[in-house]
Image (cartoon, rainbow, N blue to C red):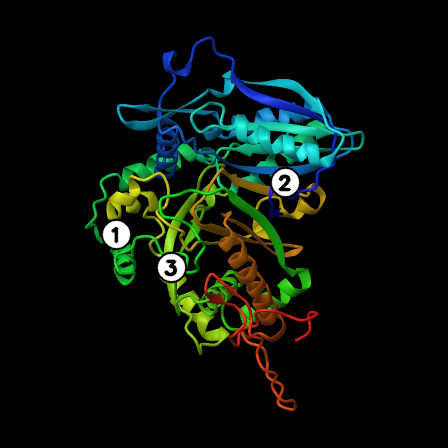
Amino acid sequence: MRQVPLETHHMAPGRVVEWRLRSAAAEPAEGRIGVTDRGTSFNQDKHFNVAEESRGAGDPFASWVAVTFEVAGPLNERALTQSLLAFVQRHEVLRCEFRRLAGELSCAPVPVEEVALDTSEVATFTTSRALAAFLSERFKRSINTLSWPLFTMGAVLRETSATVYLAFDHIVCDGMSMPIVVQEVQSTYEAVCQGATPALPSPPSYLDFAEDQRRRYRSLSADDARLGYWRSFVARGGGAFFPPFPLDLGVQPDRMYPIVNEASLLLDATEAERFERACRAVGGKPFMGVLAAVAVCLREAGGPGVYRGFMPVSERGRAMWTNSVGWFVNTMPIEFDASLGRDFAQVVAAVRESFSEMIQHIDVPFVRVWELLAPTEFAARSWPYPVNFFSYLDMRKCPGADRHGDWRPTTHVWSARANGVCSWYQRDTDGLHMNSIYVDTPTARHVMDSWQRALGATVRQIARHGSLYRPVALTAPRRPEPSGVTAAGIGFGTSRLVAAEAGGAL
């Protein structure tokens, strides 16, 4: 399971059918007896607030996260309808209507017994390109943070197979919710087709997690001891709350840009296994090795020797949330030494030590810290400038991973605009993958292309030799380094780092 742009994901054409959630009640939620408003998480509150302000400014904010997966054989539409309905009934956050009451964001979940699905025939597509264009536009138009329901569901039907798709507003889910979607919908579908009762108990509600988070951190103040880790990070950065992406992307302050959304394979399955062994050999985990490589490549491209960035961390650490759909992500700062002269083992050790320190403070919500320590930036609708961001997921460890070979699930993310760059790294049985969304400027395209090539070469070097740099042959004269190209004043070919490979040979 990997993350790729929807537009580049090959999907065979066919007949499209969609299912739309509705409440079977005669009255709206706010007018019904017994419907209780629930609290929301800090992530949800900020997300909703940005959507409100964007609409008020005539500059609508739009984004979505989606998943597609395959069903073998002719689709049993009745069974899939039952499976999708059961999925929505299991997860309370998916049935929520969000609204502000006296300044506080709250949500009112539609009761399980009132949830219904309406099925509609959409269209038949004869080419993959037309289908992809339709789905991309469909997701953009049908998912709105301020409108219920907050997701769309459908399937592309063919004679011998079908592709199921579900796309969500971020306010109800995160990236690690997507494997749960696939596992639950597929398992229930297969059980119904066989005339069996699905063995999927209802997981804990994300709304319980959100309300507990609010109770614990609503009264947090800027001088609270629990913010010591954050205050120290900000102080070491000269007072900047957001760690800047260290390469010039050619963006103007306070301006948002259209995006480039691209994915690539960094390591194939065999190389990824070798890379993991190299990381384990120096006492690290694969994500630590990838982060070490990222830090060194940024330094070699002109960035600082000390890596400073944001890293999303799952809050599903407690086993009870493993199978719950919701936004269980906290964003944390991490800082470590990747300066010139440090070898792979030393940089990984620095990552390991910094990550161990960071994880001790994971419970403090990022949005609450942002509000307290950077109130001016918090009032804005976006991060103030390109921010250094790193995300890693091992999809082999998620629910249903043992069936991914049959289901072929793929995750897709999209945002209307951006002012920086975000990169996600996923490990699956096919290797190590990278998906980046960044600003569509000539400078950014040039810089990102050069930097991603350097990163790919670096992780391959680690996989093959367990080191960051090209081995020097003692029996042959050393060839002069190529002069390299320059993008926005950043040289990519003048250091000892493997920035390019000729024919894959070292």
- Which element is circle 1 on? helix
Q: Position of residue 47 (x, y in %)?
A: 39, 35
- Which element is circle 2 on? helix
Q: CA distance from mark 1 to mark 3?
A: 16 Å
Quarter where residue 136 is shown: top right
Q: Residue at x 22, y 40 (%)?
A: 219
Amino acid type at circle 1 is Arg
Mark 2 vs 1, N-terminal side:
2
- The residue positioned farthest toward the top in the image shown: 26
The disc placed on residue 7 is 2
Quarter where residue 121 is shown: top right
The disc placed on residue 334 is 3
Mark 1 vs 3, N-terminal side:
1
Which of these two is toward me, 188 or 62? 62
Amino acid type at circle 2 is Glu
Q: Residue at x 52, y 29 (%)?
A: 90
Q: Residues within 10 Å of mark 2 (few under 14, many from 20)?
A: some
Amino acid type at circle 3 is Ile
- The residue positioned farthest toward the right in the image shown: 159
| Residue topped by disc 1 | 226
Q: Position of residue 60 (x, y in %)?
A: 43, 30
Q: Quadrant of the C terminus?
A: bottom right
Q: Nearer the viewer, mark 1 or mark 3?
A: 3
Is residue 259 placed above or below 61 in the rendered structure? Answer: below
Is residue 477 placed above or below 54 in the rendered structure? Answer: below
Q: Residues within 10 Å of mark 3 (few under 14, many from 20)?
A: many
Q: Residue at x 60, y 75 (%)?
A: 465
Q: CA distance from mark 2 to mark 1?
A: 43 Å
Which of these two is toward me, 219 or 56? 56
Q: CA distance from mark 3 to mark 2?
A: 33 Å
Q: Position of residue 101 (x, y in %)?
A: 30, 23
